[in-house]
Image (tube, rainbow, N blue to C red):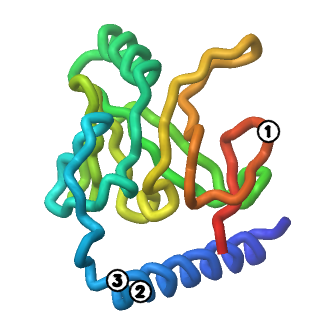
Amino acid sequence: MGTRSILSRISSNIAIRIRHNQKLQTSSSFSSSYSSLSSSAAILSDSSPSSSDEIHITDNFVRRMKELQATESGEKMLRLSVEAGGCSGFQYAFALDDRKNTDDRIFEKDGVKLVVDKISYDFVKGASVDYVEELIRSAFQVVENPSAVGGCSCKSSFMVKQ
């Protein structure tokens, strides 16, 4: 698949997502969309999305991040981002990071932080992030994503709902 077709798919999906978000904003008037934060993940940002928009962090995620933090210098956070590519159109990328950008959202559970940039957040809001240990590999994974309609068997790529 050529670069031009990938860029075309990305820009098309982003345009669809923006139109969808604008429709939601104008039709809902935000009257009851904000509820109290659940204990599964506290959001440390200026805006308070509804609990259905939170990114949920599992206990396995917390345990593995604490193990990684014990071997790293400084306080590391796990950065989740969405990139073009993968078997299904988009793929999840995870990286240890110690910097927070101005447009980042931070989700925290038991002192462990997950960082998501503004653009990626639109693709993963409401998702759950876990650390999965299997016979052939162990990795951080997005295990439930309401924005995804399908993906490949490796669970690292997905298609966006249209």
For the point 59% across and 25% down, which residue is it? 139
With 140 as the anchor, is 61 left or right in this view?
A: left
Residue 153: assigned label: 1
Query: Is there any visible trace of residue 66 in the rendered image?
Result: yes
Query: Is there any visible trace of residue 98 in the rendered image?
Result: no
As measured in the structure, the alpha-carbon distance from the residue carrying label 1 to the one carrying label 2 is: 33 Å
**Residue 155, x across and y down, in percent:** 69, 39
- What residue did someone put label 3 on? 28
Query: Secondary structure beneath disc 3?
Result: helix
As measured in the structure, the alpha-carbon distance from the residue carrying label 2 to the one carrying label 3 is: 10 Å
Query: Secondary structure beneath disc 1?
Result: loop
**Residue 60, x across and y down, in percent:** 46, 19
Using the image, determine if residue 15 lies above or below residue 71.
below
Which amino acid, mark 1?
Answer: Ser
As measured in the structure, the alpha-carbon distance from the residue carrying label 3 to the one carrying label 1 is: 36 Å
Say which of 50 and 125 sits in front.
50
Callout 3 environment at 10 Å: few (<14), some (14 to 19), or many (20+)? few
Query: Secondary structure beneath disc 2?
Result: helix
Pick the quarter of the image with the N terminus: bottom right
Callout 1 environment at 10 Å: few (<14), some (14 to 19), or many (20+)? few
Using the image, determine if residue 45 lies above or below residue 136.
below
- What residue did someone put label 2 on? 22
Say which of 72 and 79 sits in front.
79
**Residue 131, x across and y down, in percent:** 52, 24
Which of the 4 image quarters holds residue 74? top left
Using the image, determine if residue 123 lies above or below residue 23.
above
Which of the 4 image quarters holds residue 84? bottom right
Pick the quarter of the image with the C terminus: bottom right
Q: Earlier in the sequence, mark 3 or mark 1?
A: 3
